[in-house]
Image (cartoon, helix red, strand yellow):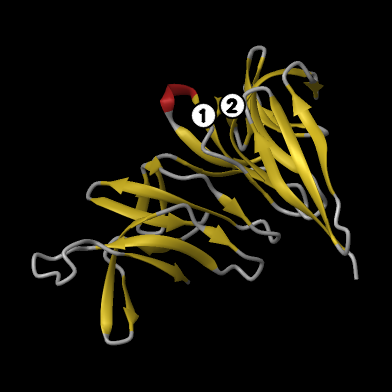
Amino acid sequence: MTRIGQLIIVLCAAFVWGLSIEEARGASYSLSFIAKSGDVIGGKTLSQFLGSIDLNESGLAAFQASYTGGSGVFTQNSFVAGTNSSIGGKTLTGVDFRGVQMNDSGVVAFIGDLAGGADGVFTQNELIAEEGDAIGALNADVISTRPDINNAGTVTFTGIDTSPFTSAIFTKTQVVVKTGDVISRGLQNFTMQNFTAPSIDGAGNITFATTRFCLAADLFGACSVARCRV
């Protein structure tokens, strides 16, 4: 059987490329051009490409770029959202370049910049959370990582409640896990402290890396990192 796949894109300041791989006897490799500085997509003239890129199962690529008059999120076919876009009653002043994630329906999760210096987690269809929003028992005062989205449209991200300091992974409506939560590994309890950007699968399982609280009597002499699934 011949299996055709696509590798995630190489990104630089002026070009975006995709690499297609055909896995079979006598496999062939080919580069497909996605976008370059000067291209016009959705009426926007692209200048620079920044941040990470995502690719869905249909071969649609989502990326961030600056353009004359602002910055935004694009696919190779369309302008998704950016400066002056209105989503969920909020008008974007630009997009943050911490990265985008896209599901197989073409819905893109990203961080948008807002007036006054605040950030928000958005898709092109809705506001997920704005810095300072109360979610569960915490406030998402600082959005600290790029979001992720699954095919059901559930968005998850890491944020910080600043008073007192509490790192947490959020969805739109709940706190998934937070600083001080304990998980067990064999006979050892692991108290979680900080969290990296989460990933969410189609069943809603969320994976992430976390550091643990370190005690003076820690025999290992350093904090350790665990990869967890909830």
Query: Which residue is denoted by mark 2 in the rendering?
Result: 91
Q: Which residue is mark 1?
A: 113
- Residue at left 69%, top 61%? 152
The kind of residue on which mark 2 rests is Thr
Task: Classify mark 1: helix, strand or loop.
Answer: strand
Which residue, as the protein is rendered here, is positioned at the far top? Answer: 68
Picture layout, residue 103 above or below residue 204: above
Percent position of residue 106, x then y? 76, 47
Spot occupied by residue 137 in the image (x, y as percentages of width and height): 35, 58
The Cα–Cα distance between marks 2 and 1, rounded to whole angstroms, is 9 Å
User: Which residue is located at x 75 percent, y 24 percent?
Assistant: 36
Question: Outermost residue toward the front?
Answer: 26
Residue 127 location (% of width, % of height): 58, 42
Residue at the spot x=59%, y=68% of the render?
204
Quadrant where the N terminus sits is: bottom right
Counting residues from the N terminus, which is met first, the one under dot 2 or under dot 1? 2
Q: Residue at the right extreme? A: 1
Find out whether the residues at labels 2 and 1 contact each other: C-beta distance under 8 Å: no
